[in-house]
Image: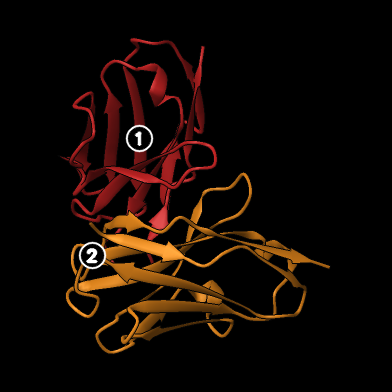
Chain colours: A red, B orange
Amino acid sequence: DIQMTQSPSAMSASVGDRVTITCRASRAINNNVAWFQQKPGKVPQRLIYGASSLQSGVPSRFSGSGSGTEFTLTISSLQPEDFATYYCLQHNGFPLTFGQGTKVEIK
Amino acid sequence: QVQLVQSGAEVKKAGASVTVSCKASGYAFTSTYYIHWVRQAPGQGPEWMGVLDPRDGTTNYAQKFKGRATMTRDTSTSTVYLELSSLRSEDTALYYCARSQLWPLSLDSWGQGSLVTVSS
């Protein structure tokens, strides 16, 4: 199975900060990565698919990059509504696997 | 629009079985989409359990759930079912169904989740 190692597991940031979250795959997975945002008690919402394509309706401050084994989610200017937990998902084949999550908290 | 509507919360005793349903609407159920099941234990990240192809009922399970999880579908009602047997306390979680294309497998729509609580 492909393991997704996500870092950091938690971080504190201020409104307006640039935030970067990384996922490393245990082997090459082309661009088959998605990023999700989850707020407490809510369903995960897809932000990015195909490693870098922005989901319709998602603000442009979110971006994704990477290919192969290293993938990054960037929030260019953190907004109050962005405080949440973020997960990467590799979907290069079965089984799908998620990263462990990054909780972004208010500094 | 695409909707996946799941059944309500369940409370089960350890050792029992539970069945959760997921009714799809807003797209052609037996076309080019899979239905996946993902669970999330309290305070934990999501965990992929397996996938069903509504066209022919073909399934693929995560190793951890082989022999204990069974996914089926009813094409007449566009509904997918997840049965989990031999429940234990560690199975207490929110169970989500989610849709993907046949390729790529990115999960693009999710159900609202069904809480399963296992008591001893």
Residue B2 vs residue B103, the one in the foreground: B2
How many numbered marks have been drawn onto this rendered protein structure?
A: 2
Residue B5 vs residue A78, the one in the foreground: B5
Tags 2 and 1 touching, CB below 8 Å: no
Q: Chain of mark 1?
A: A
Residue at (53, 37) in percent of width and height: A40
Secondary structure beneath disc 2? loop
Looking at the image, is B98 positioned above or below residue A17? below
Q: Where residue B87 appears, x then y in whole percent?
A: 70, 74
Residue at (35, 12) in percent of width and height: A17
The amino acid at mark 2 is Gly
Q: Where residue B78 appears, x then y in whole percent?
A: 32, 78
Work out which quarter of the rendered image holds the N terminus of chain A and state it. Answer: bottom left
Residue at numbered disc 1: A22
Residue A96 appears in the figure = yes
Is B109 left, or right, of A40 in this rendering? Answer: left
Secondary structure beneath disc 1? strand
The amino acid at mark 1 is Thr
Residue at (35, 81) in percent of width and height: B77
Residue A73 vs residue A22, the one in the foreground: A73
Residue at numbered disc 2: B26
